[in-house]
């Protein structure tokens, strides 16, 4: 079932995003340990104006467990979503990077899909004889 993310999904979604960001190997996040990045994502998830906060997320749930997540937003809000990175770095008492963590990518008239990931155990599987076609 595809649904809007909620606060309850924080642990599962934060781990999914953590694995995807590690896979992407973002240069500006390399100086953070895995624990620091995990904490940053968990705290950020609860912020409404964070790129990876719950208001921007849609969760795919199977048997009550979030197994996939998609993050997207309209181009008009992309720059405001990135302002929260600095606050989160300060909260962790880590110096924020000089440049944006993620480069703006959305064109002015589009809705941007930033991240789409599925838990490793759930990849290449179908549920109830259906692919993720919602």
Image: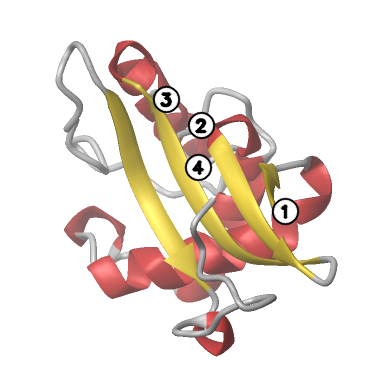
Residue at label 3?
Answer: 81
Separation of marks 3 and 4 at Cα, in angstroms: 8 Å
Rate crowding at label 4 as few (under 14), some (14 to 19) or many (20 or more) other CA atoms within 10 Å.
Answer: many
The image position of residue 111, as x and y in percent, is: 32, 24
Judged from the image, the secondary structure of the residue bearing numbered disc 2 is loop
Residue at label 1?
Answer: 10
Between discs 3 and 4, the one toward the N terminus: 4
Are the residues at dot 3 and dot 2 in contact (C-beta closer than 8 Å)? yes
Q: Quadrant of residue 28?
A: bottom left
Between discs 1 and 3, the one toward the N terminus: 1
Are the residues at dot 4 and dot 2 in contact (C-beta closer than 8 Å)? yes
The image position of residue 105, as x and y in percent, is: 17, 32
Q: Nearer the viewer, residue 132 or 12?
A: 132
Are the residues at dot 3 and dot 4 in contact (C-beta closer than 8 Å)? no
Judged from the image, the secondary structure of the residue bearing numbered disc 1 is helix
Residue 91 visible here: no
Separation of marks 4 and 2 at Cα, in angstroms: 5 Å
The image position of residue 6, as x and y in percent, is: 77, 41
Residue at label 4?
Answer: 52
Residue drawn 15% across the image and 20% down it: 107
Q: Nearer the viewer, residue 91 or 123?
A: 123
């Amino acid at each position: 079932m595809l649904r809007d993310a909620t606060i309850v999904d924080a642990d599962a979604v934060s781990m999914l995003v953590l694995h995807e960001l590690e896979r992407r190997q973002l240069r500006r996040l390399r100086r953070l340990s895995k624990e620091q990045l995990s904490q940053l994502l968990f705290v950020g998830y609860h912020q409404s104006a964070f790129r990876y906060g719950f208001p921007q997320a849609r969760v795919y749930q199977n048997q009550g467990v979030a197994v996939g997540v998609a993050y997207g937003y309209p181009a008009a809000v992309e720059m405001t979503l990135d302002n929260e990175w600095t606050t989160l770095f300060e909260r962790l008492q880590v110096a924020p990077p000089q440049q944006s963590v993620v480069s703006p990518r959305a064109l002015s008239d589009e809705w941007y899909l930033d991240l789409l990931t599925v838990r490793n155990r759930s990849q290449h599987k179908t549920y109830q004889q259906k692919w993720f076609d919602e």
